[in-house]
Amino acid sequence: MTIPSRDRQPGRTPADAATLLCCGGRRVGRYVHRPHLDHRLAPRPYLHPLTTLAGLPVTELMPADHPHHLGVSIAVPDVAGGNFWGGRTFVRGQGPVELDNHGEQRHAGWLLRDPDGFVEELSWYAAGAEVLRERRAVAVAPAGDAAWALGVSFALTNVSGAPLSFASPAVNGRPGAGYGGYFWRAPRADRPPRVFTAAAEGEAAVHGRTAGWLALAADDWTLVFAGATDATRRDPWFVRVRDYPGVGSALAWSERVPLAPGATLTRRVVTAVADGRLDRAAAAALARRAVA
């Protein structure tokens, strides 16, 4: 069964093409696969809004502090010089610079589309040429009485005909800014959320480190992120809570990741979305349940 939806939102004309996602008959998300966005935002499909089972929002779209943050998306700051993250590009020796180098991810077709998930094909374009072809799978599943799990996997194949590589601002000279890959922008609240792993607590202790799972706990909701493949578990977590709440699984934290012509890079992250503020034991149990 498919559930197409074309919703009109303020500031976007014509309407974005979107698909609704449900868990156990409850609507928990919306996937916008054909957004109408300014090119400086690196147009790409995104998930927003996502909510808890009780209906509390857990994503934020185009916030004033970072307009290029689009709910949950796959975003990479540097693919062979193309900016698929949005906003300014960090240039070694110059800092953040406004460049006309923004890439675009284009929906190419569905292989499967149901209320609890989909498999999609996309093309990544830089400077008018297709450089990557992606197969993206998104799945929604129950994760207990007060939680559900979002599984997102993506396989990026180099179709440019030449070697390319992935990089982050950290690779290009900005310490600590190793973001790029799966990224979740959470909504702001009156106080920053708590962030922790099985062994560490706080932004400074978890940012840039690897961990089997990582939790972001606000007053009314908790997100538990887990790498679901060996390659994904080797990627460090990019974490922000003081400046804004956001978590990502970083593809290229400290050095460029090469991709030969015809080669494929694959990652999978599962995020459990729970009502309430979970402690470490409850978060660990939810992580195990979500990736089982």
Image (cartoon, rainbow, N blue to C red):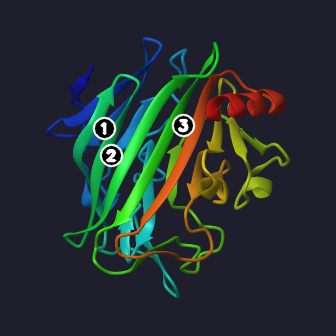
| In the image: residue 231, left or right of residue 110 | right
Label 2 residue SS: loop
Measured Cα–Cα span from mark 3 to mark 2 = 19 Å
Label 1 residue SS: strand
Please identify the quadrant where the N terminus is shown: top left
Q: How many marks?
A: 3
Three-letter code for the amino acid on which mark 1 is drawn: Val
Answer yes or no: is residue 57 visible: yes
Q: Do the residues labelled 3 and 2 touch (CB within 8 Å)?
A: no
Q: Earlier in the sequence, mark 3 or mark 2?
A: 2
Q: Where is residue 199 in the image (x, y as percent from the top left)?
A: 85, 47
Query: In the image, which is nearer the foreground, mark 3 or mark 1?
Result: 1
Q: Where is residue 18 in the image (x, y as percent from the top left)?
A: 27, 33
* Residue at the (25%, 39%) spot, across then down: 110
Q: Are marks 3 and 1 in contact (CB under 8 Å)?
A: no
Measured Cα–Cα span from mark 1 to mark 2 = 5 Å
Q: Mark 3 points at which residue?
A: 187
Q: Which of marks 3 and 1 is nearer the N terminus?
A: 1
Neighbourhood count class around disc 3 (C-alpha, 10 Å): few under 14, some 14–19, many 20 upward: some
Three-letter code for the amino acid on which mark 2 is drawn: Pro
Q: Do the residues labelled 1 and 2 touch (CB within 8 Å)?
A: yes
Q: Which of marks 1 and 2 is nearer the N terminus?
A: 1
Label 3 residue SS: loop
Q: Which residue lies furthest to the bottom in this view?
A: 93
Q: Mark 2 points at which residue?
A: 45
Q: Name the residue under label 1.
A: 32
- Which of 59 and 166 lies nearest the eye of the viewer? 166
